[in-house]
Structure formats: C-alpha cells, structure tokens
Image: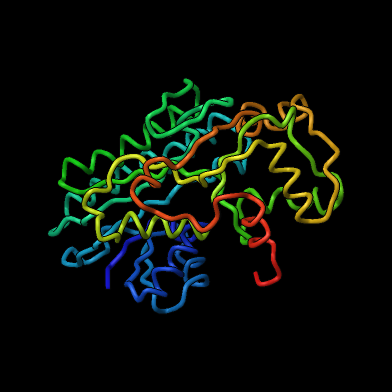
Amino acid sequence: MANVLITGGTGLIGQALVEKLKQHHHDVTVLTRHKAKAEKVFDFDVGIVDDLYSIDPNIYFDAIVNLAGEPIADKRWSEAQKSRIYRSRVDSTYGLVKWMKTRLMMPSVLISGSAVGWYGDGKSSLLTEQSGFHQEYTHELCQDWEDAAQSAKELGCRVCIMRTGLVLSNKGGFLQKMLPSFKCYVGGPISNGRQYMPWIHIDDMVNAIMYLAFDSQRENLSGVYNLTAPKPVTNKEFSQTLAKTLGRPCALFVPSLMLKLIFGEMAQLLLTGQNAIPERLSQAGFEFKYHTLAPALEDVLSEKH
C-alpha cells in the first residue's frame, strides 16, 4: 500500500486517478484550491488540503502526481488568462518542488503534467519523445512547465513528465464539448480536418500513471512520456468515427475563419495538431487497452457509463 499526494485532484484525470488508487487500497491526499468542492467529490477516506505546508512533515509520500492547472481551452487567451494559465502550471510546480525540499523524506517519484502542445504544430509528422518542436505559445508554456518539474531531480527524486493528449471520458473534457453539435446533426470536421488529434482513453491515462508510479521496474522509468494512444487520428477521422458511433451524419465543416473570430489566438489549438505516439511508454512495456479510436468511443459513450 502506497501513500500518494495529488495536486489538481478534482479535475477530470485527478478524480479518475483517485478512484483507481482507492480501488488498490492506497492512501490518497488531494491538494486543491477548492476544498469545499473536493469534500463533495471525495468520500471521507481521502485526505483533502488547500495548503501544502499544513501537511505533517513526518508523513512520507511514495509518489506525487502533479495535475494542477487552469484549463487551457475554457476561455479566450487574453494576456490576463495566459498569465493565469502560466501561474497555475509553472509557478505552482516550482512551489511544489520548493515544498518538497522541506520534507524529512523525499518522495520516490514526481509524476508531473505537460501536454502534446509541447511539440507545437506538428502537421503530419510522426512525433515521438525524441522529436523536435515548432516554436509557439503552447511549446513555451509546456517547456517551462516541464523545466519546473525536472528541477526536482536535483533533490534525488525520480521525475516522469506526461505529455498528455486529448483524454476521452464521459465525465468531461473535450469530448463532452463536441457531443452536443454531433447529437444535433450539425457536427463535423474543423477546417480541412487534416490536423491530428492525439487521444487517449481515460482508463489508459490512469493506468499509465499507475504504471509509471508503481511498476516493478519503475526505478528505470523517468523523463518524458507521450500519454497518447498508439493510433492517433486526424480531426476528420475523429469526427467521422464519433458521428458513426452516435448514428449521426458528418457532412458539415467548421470554417477556420469562424474559429479565429470566436476564439482568437486560442483557435490554434483546434486548427493545429500533433501526430504523437507513445513510443517510450510502449518500450517500457505498458499495454494499452484501447489502441484504436472506435472501441474507445464506443466504451466511453456506452450505456454502462
């Protein structure tokens, strides 16, 4: 049984991870800015704190999973919103590492969030963890975020960085924002639909975090990992597969000009993409449950959920 600290535990990934950890009888503490919300989300068996320094310094955490961050696509990218996004990721991660320095016992591993946005617009190029990047806002944000987490290596802590793709879940995230238009028969690809969408099923996302934290060979697992399914698809393919799963047509295209007018700079998130694959995770022996999109969507949208 392990003791795990999760920052940003009330988010989509955090809630699923807490549930999985409790199923395996691990002890969980959640750091959150919204303690009242967390108390409604989690039962009495999860520790909830809103200040790291309120945690007993004698408590040892086997793993810290850093998921904190302002949602990047919920609001138009004003300069003020960009600053909030940056502080909630980069500054908070440096703050986490600063707190780790005060601990009597160093955690075995820090697993910290990032995103495939690190690569910028990858067009159709196949992207592994060894690939380069296109210089743009999302790369700069993710690079600073990763640098903050990697600073924990100086403390002797193993660090794993998760460059996460689009997470498929029935409880939130990007898919829930797409469903209304498709269900109303007006869904379709964005622009020409050629931009890649590196996706991952929520179950594989959580299982991959567990693998990085607790696998028997975990001492050898560190550095950057793409947390994406092995078979990314284009936006057109995604739209067609979603429409077929829902029994709806997929005939309309969303013009890029409309998105730019509505979202401004943030429209780039929708108009560009990354053909990213989980090379290092696969090499490490992790086995995905969902390799291809159709079964993943069928599971997420099934009645069992």
Residue occupying the far bottom of the picture = 44
Q: Is 93 or 245 nearer to us in this picture?
A: 245
Q: Position of residue 171 (x, y in %)?
A: 61, 61
Which residue appears farthest toward the top when viewing the image?
Answer: 135
Kindly identify the residue that appears in the image at 84 percent across and 51 percent down: 248
The mark total stands at: 0
Could you tell me if residue 121 is visible in this image? no
| Image-based side of 178 in relation to 154, left or right | right
| Placement of the C terminus among the 4 image quadrants | bottom right
Q: Nearer the viewer, residue 285 or 37?
A: 285
User: Left or right of 279: which side holds 102?
Assistant: left
Say which of 134 and 245 sits in front. 245
Percent x, y for residue 126?
51, 30
In the rendered image, residue 64, in percent from the top left (x then y), is placed at 30, 56
What residue is at 39 percent from the left and 78 percent from the top? Answer: 45
**25 versus 290 height, above or below:** below
What residue is at 38 percent from the left and 42 percent from the top?
Answer: 225
Say above or below: 304 vs 69.
below
Q: Position of residue 71 (x, y in %)?
A: 54, 45
Quadrant showing the N terminus: bottom left
Would you identify the image quadrant in which residue 140 lies?
top left
Position of residue 156 relative to residue 301, above or below, is: above
Residue 107 shows up from this direction = yes
Q: Residue at x 24, y 62 (%)?
A: 62
Q: Is residue 130 left or right of residue 3?
A: right
- For the rendered model, the colour scheme is rainbow
The foreground one among 22 and 249 is 249
